[in-house]
Image (tube, rainbow, N blue to C red):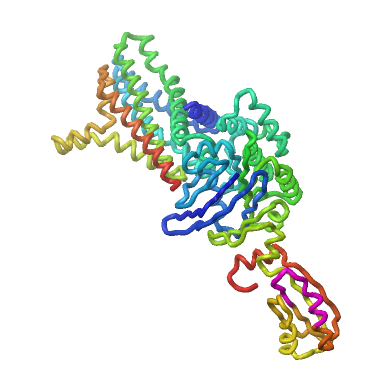
Amino acid sequence: MEKAFIIAKREIKSYFVSPTAYIIIGLFLLISGFIYYVTLLSSGVAEVRGFLLNMCFTFMMLSPILTMRLLSEEKKLGTLEFLYTSPIKVSDIVIGKYLGALLLYLVITLFFLQFPLYLVLFSKPDLGSILTSLLGFLLNGCACIAIGLFASSLSENQLIAAVVGMISVLFFWIIGWVSGLSPGGVGNFFASLSLIKPLENLSKGVINAEDIFYYSALIFFFLFITIKRLEWKRW
Amino acid sequence: MIEVKNLSKFYGPTKAVENVSFTVGKGEILGLLGPNGAGKTTIMRILTGYFQPTSGSVKIAGFDVVEEPLEVKKRIGYMQEGQQGPALYYEMTVSSFLSFAAEIKGTPKKDRSQNILKAMELAGIKDVRHRIIGRLSSGYKQRVGLAQALLNDPEILILDEPTRGLDPKQIIEIRQLIKNMAGERTIILSSHILPEVSMTCGKIVIIDKGEKVAEDTQAELAKKLEGGDRVVVKIKGKPDAGEVTKEFKKIKNLKEVRVEAEGNSTRIEVVRSGSKDIREDLFATAVENNWIILEMKSSSLSLEEVFLRLTTREDV
């Protein structure tokens, strides 16, 4: 586990050496500023709910840019072989990569905190629902990064990794719509896979054990199949 | 130190390596020689635990590569070959890459900077340590790869084409460096260039199409495998070729006789099969038949020829 942190440290450094980190943070803040302005100032209601849901969706679309290089680039350069032949477990490599991307996401969230802060400074919003919404924003990001990391393990081509990641994330976003088509067991099953539902609950200020479990299960599942994917490739 | 037994590796139905066995003693340098695509890199990747073998076993310093990969990896320094030269993180500086590698290899914190300095000194990259790897020339990149392999003082070094992309002066330096390390370290290096292997390695394993075709020291290889020395005799005049062949064939331990006319003289090339010197017999035969010898010279097969004979199916 200690070695995972070494990987994570290198990863976060390399984000800031290349323009990737700056582009993502810049783009994200630009879009969030725009959405913030439109949704809040035009409605005149001191509520972050709609804004945060929009931001979660925006990050979903941006997250593959953040994750596409994680494993693809290592594969392409051959440095994955260096890691494999060093005394470090595959699970440590994957967790380290995940933590590295997560750290960058935390940096983005830090910048992002300014928007709820304006609300707190200039009006009296419901603080509870702001905090749960932020939790939702964080957890949603963690899930998207796990999905993107898996996509990145599939190809040494970063573009393919990004496209696969984006489509997978989108899939988890829209899968809930199936419940409208076929009510009952099947529809409920697909609805329970959706990323939207737990996010909506959290933005209303409701913290369910079920929703937290959903996020952890999703993250765990994608990290697990990423590890399996990397181990399997060597047989 | 290194024990490879009946190693095979198949990618689906495609054979990469089949039934390769060899051993390397402590302090020895072994050269894996073979044409491109022969399976050298695959063997090295199995040795370093990157690939799992389909069958067979590899033991390094007493540990099985499949059973205890982490123990093996701790003892190995591996310099691999990427698609575009050595595989390194191009956006990092030399020293930050090496300190990352040292951390991954688990060098204790107090020894780390000492360790990195030593590896940089050995590989001769101290002057470029603050530069970004991606901007270094390919020779220097190669050396950074070597320095990475040398970190943590591994007992075993596995070097995949260590001199690829270097200029002649650097090649000589790297070879010298590898030679100097023999004795204290066990080294396996691969190459498709013969002089390289013959200059640095005590023992040579020749691989072709995934199979081991020969294993020996360089001198033994040339002698034992291809029937040793070859002698060229030039005699005056043009005696009947059939007659000449017949007469020379009477000599024991003679493998091949080739006769061809050359202007006013005849050139006869013989290859012996044993280790006994046949020049005396050749002389005696010539005298018996009243042939006047103008010239006689012997040459042993160069490693290059042995290599070509072993790795090509047709006669060379």
Q: Please say whether residue A189 is one of the residues in the magenta stretch.
A: no
Q: For this view, does B189 lie left or right of residue A54?
A: right
Between residues B155 and B166, which one lies in front from this camera angle? B155
Would residue A207 be seen by someone viewing this image from the given angle?
yes
Q: Residue at x 70, y 64 (%)?
A: B222
**Image location (x, y in percent) of residue B282:** 79, 79
A210, above or below B77, in the image: above
Q: Quadrant of residue B93?
A: top right
Give the residue at x 25% y 22%. Answer: A201
Q: Nearer the viewer, residue A227 or B181?
A: B181
Quadrant placement of the C terminus of chain B: bottom right
Q: In this view, which residue lies farthest toward the left?
A: A184
What is the residue that sits farthest to the bottom in this orientation?
Answer: B240
x and y percentages locating residue B124 in the rendered image = 73, 38
Visible in this render: residue A22? no
Q: Nearer the viewer, residue A207 or B95?
A: B95
Q: Quadrant of residue B249?
A: bottom right
* Residue A61 picture location, percent across and down: 37, 34
Task: Give the quarter of the image for residue A116.
Answer: top left
Horizontal side of residue A136 vs B75, given as left or right: left
Quadrant placement of the N terminus of chain B: top right
Residue B164 image point, x, y percent = 65, 50
Residue drawn at x 28%, y 28% as measured from the top left = A214
The region drawn magenta spans B270-284
Q: Is residue A89 above or below residue B82?
A: above
Q: How many marks can you see? A: 0
> Is residue B280 magenta-colored?
yes
